[in-house]
Image (tube, grey):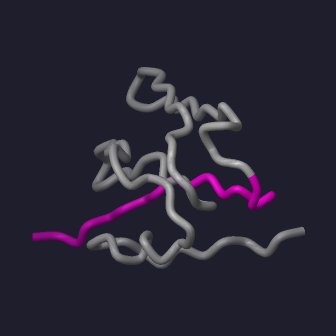
Amino acid sequence: QGQVSTYSYYIYNYSRSGTFSASQAQVKLYFDGTTRTYNAPGGTGYYWNVFDIVNGTLVPCNSGCVSSSSAARSAKPGAAPFVMPPKK
């Protein structure tokens, strides 16, 4: 059995104020010939895990998608470390 390749798409709330749902943010993804729209979920935190792509398969986040730290990211099996770029 081969290694699991996981790519995750996160949105980070740089302002650290308000919520993702209050921002009415949307992510539009063009994948495998179709367009998918993801609306900001409820919850408190600074990181929104929108979806993962696991071995070429799209896996939308359906629960617990907003967290206060990127620590939840590193807990996923087969996941590479998640590092935020420095704030400019």
Q: Is residue 75 above or below residue 41?
A: below
Count numbered badges in the picture.
0
Nearest the viewer among 78 and 17 is 17
Residue at the extreme right of the image, as rendered: 88
Q: Please say if 35 is above or below 61.
A: above
Relative vertical location of residue 62 with respect to residue 26 in this rendering, above or below: below
Q: Is residue 84 left or right of residue 63?
A: right
Q: In which quarter of the image is residue 16?
A: bottom right
Question: Does residue 39 appear to the left or right of 32 in the view shown?
Answer: right
Does the magenta run of residues contain 56?
A: no
- In screen coordinates, is 45 left or right of 85? left
Magenta region: which residues?
Answer: 1-17
> Would you place residue 52 above or below residue 29 in this image?
below
Q: What is the x, y in percent for residue 29?
A: 52, 32
Q: In which quarter of the image is the C terminus?
A: bottom right
What is the x, y in percent for residue 26? 61, 32
